[in-house]
Amino acid sequence: MTIKQNLEQLALEKNSPCVTISLNTHRTHPDNTQDEIVLKNLIHEAEERVIQEYGKRDVASLLEKLSTIHIDVNHNLDSLHIYLSNDTSEVIKSSWPITQNGVHISDRFDIRPLMKSYIRTEEYYILLLSQSGTILYKALNDEIINEVKNDDFPFPDNRHYNTHSDKGSDSKHLDDLVREYLNTIDKAIINIYNETGSNIVVVATEDNYSRLQQVADRPLVYSGQAPINYNNTTTHHIAKQAWEIIRELQHRRRTEAMSDIREAVGQGMVLTDLQEIYQASIDGRGDLLIVHQDFAQPVHMTSDRTFELVGDTSAKEVIDDITSYIAWEVLSKKGKVFFTEQDEIKDLGAIVLKTRY
């Protein structure tokens, strides 16, 4: 199940209770040995709180699920999130750390960590471009998932070699052959882009990348170029290079989103009141939401459209963070969402929404 599918399931569920356990984890030994101890303590805390708030009888199946949780710490990433109710049991590993370990009990799951992970996660392609052979990889953040193998990829070496002995020193002719090779690759990339809409990062020499841009039907399909190191073309190294370009792209998106928000302020299309933002989001009016990553607001719902702010997240039927549900409503209705560290947003508010109308 993808992160988006998990979100769709977990964001919509209402149950009594929904238990969320979130903790930072470690990828390597010996640091990962402490993860099992931390998880055990959090499970114990969840059991005690569930029994105290709901009694044993109505949550017997949930308590059984809690008692049987087991995680192989040798395969951890940077955080772990467990979602349990009488109807649901999901364990999700994430490559993004969280601010604080904790147990959340309410009639809804705490989806903020999953929401952040979904927004920050990017699937894209890495084109390892060389005239001695070209390979296309599918990547997820800083890791390569697999090599693409289809009717086009991998590309063999440049077969448009010079067959005319009298043109062996004709630089223009040789350049035309290279451009023909790159043009063929570009057409294959366009097919991939049209199917997926994913970004393409090119690992190549500056010369080959420049020529690719010149012959490309749609140059903007390519998100950037990292220099190729023929002494190190391991997938780990290539993915690390490409991820830096994608991270810079994400930063530019956040900066552009801030500019969009500021322009919309003068048009009266920006909301900063949390209650108004929530109502606009569920009505499908949310076009662009920006939330400062340090901001969270627990609430108690008083109706389907209204809530009251609370300070005690351990109280019964309290949603730990309403911003997560606002973010999901905006995303699920084709809007854009950014969690940002940039403090420029704070002169407008810790959470701002640009509306469609």
Image (cartoon, rainbow, N blue to C red):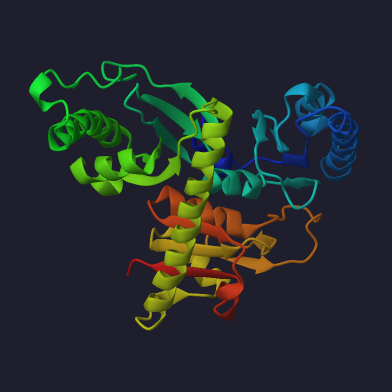
**Which residue sits at x=16%, y=22%?**
162
Task: Please state, as top left, top right, bottom left or bottom right, where the C terminus lies in the image.
Answer: bottom left
Q: State the image coordinates of residue 56 (x, y, percent, origin top left).
A: 86, 33
Q: Is residue 294 above or below residue 90?
A: below
Query: Which residue is at a point 48% across and 29% down the rendered structure image?
Result: 230
Q: Is residue 217 above or below residue 260?
A: above
User: Could you tell me residue 126's position as x and y percent?
Assistant: 42, 33
Name which quarter of the figure residue 53 lies in. top right
**Residue 7 seen in the figure:** no
Residue placed most toward the observer, 43 or 255: 255
Residue 30 picture quarter: top right
User: On the rendered structure, is 260 left or right of 157?
Assistant: right
Percent coordinates x, y for residue 114 in the rendering: 61, 43
When the figure is inspected, residue 172 is found, relative to residue 105, above or below; the finding is above
- In front of the other: 1 or 78: 78
Residue 351 visible somewhere in the drawing:
yes
Give the residue drawn at x 54%, y 47%. 120
- The quarter of the displayed image where residue 204 is located: top left
